[in-house]
Image (cartoon, grey):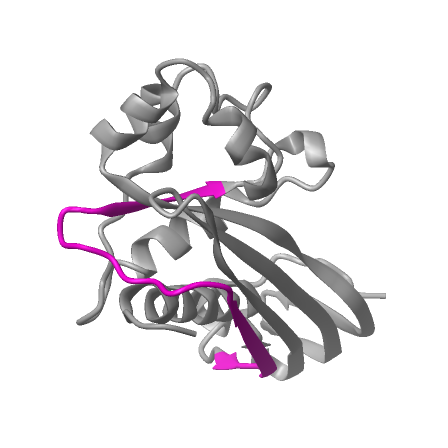
Amino acid sequence: MMQKTMIPAAMLLISLTGCMTTRVEESKNAATGILTNERIVILEASYHSGNETEDKFVDCVSKTVQKGNRGLNVFPDDEFIDAMFPWFEPRTMPRGPEALPALFERPGLTERLKASGVRYIIWVTGDTEKSASGGSLSCAVSPAGGGCFGLAWWEDDSSYKAAIWDIRAGKSAGEVSTKVHGTSVIPAVIIPVPMIARTRAAACKGLANELRQLIAVEGPL
């Protein structure tokens, strides 16, 4: 069992990257493309579905998808929700893209969407979970010095999916998913050497890059 002990900052001298494996998959249902005056909005799943996506992950994807030569113009999700009030509030928002056609029949909503400039609505679901852990690590500090001894490890699984709805075409444009498995290890002989697998960050980068590629590149399947 891992023991949690306060470790002096001076002892945390090295931080390496743990071992990770990443898998990214894309399913494209229709020709895509986006104009310079069009935007996307990235929304997290409603908590009514029983598995609310982390806000920080959605923020990470939104920021990352804007970078690079094919960076996309992102409408901030909170501003979009306010502009579409009350249809995308947490308690009333549809649970996924399949519910959008019925929602768009609401009076006035189509006009608001056109005014927003949003071409694609992207629904993100998923989470990061610790799948296993073990080992033992203990640290002690005394007037004569201090140190840490032992080895602790844990495994994280980050699994996320983004469903893309093309508002202009009125249908699904495709889906992107990413799965990252990582093992973090902290060996210590006096000085702990954390080797952290940042699976959530890797999943964010993989999902954002694939979304940017799927949307920005025009053409058929």
Residue occupying the point 37% across, 65% down: 31
Residue occupying the point 32% across, 61% down: 64
Relative horizontal placement of residue 140, taking residue 28 as reference (left or right): right
Percent coordinates x, y for residue 41 in the rendering: 36, 43
Residue 174 in sight in this render: yes
Residue 12 belongs to the span the image colors magenta: no
Q: Which residues are magenta?
A: 16-43
Q: In terms of depth relative to the viewer, which is nearer, 26 or 52?
A: 26
Residue occupying the point 17% across, 71% down: 69
52 up-or-down from 143: above or below: above
Relative horizontal placement of residue 99, taking residue 59 as reference (left or right): right
- Majority SS type along the magenta span: strand
Percent coordinates x, y for residue 180 in the rendering: 61, 73
Percent coordinates x, y for residue 79 in the rendering: 31, 28
The N terminus - image quarter: bottom right
Relative horizontal placement of residue 180, taking residue 216 as reference (left or right): right
Residue occupying the point 73% across, 71% down: 154
Residue 194 in sight in this render: no
Relative horizontal placement of residue 154, taking residue 159 as reference (left or right): right
24 up-or-down from 177: above or below: below
The C terminus - image quarter: bottom left
127 up-or-down from 27: above or below: above
Q: In terms of depth relative to the viewer, which is nearer, 25 or 154?
A: 25
Q: Residue 133, located in which quarter of the rendered image? A: bottom right
Residue 21 belongs to the span the image colors magenta: yes
Which residue extends farthest right?
1
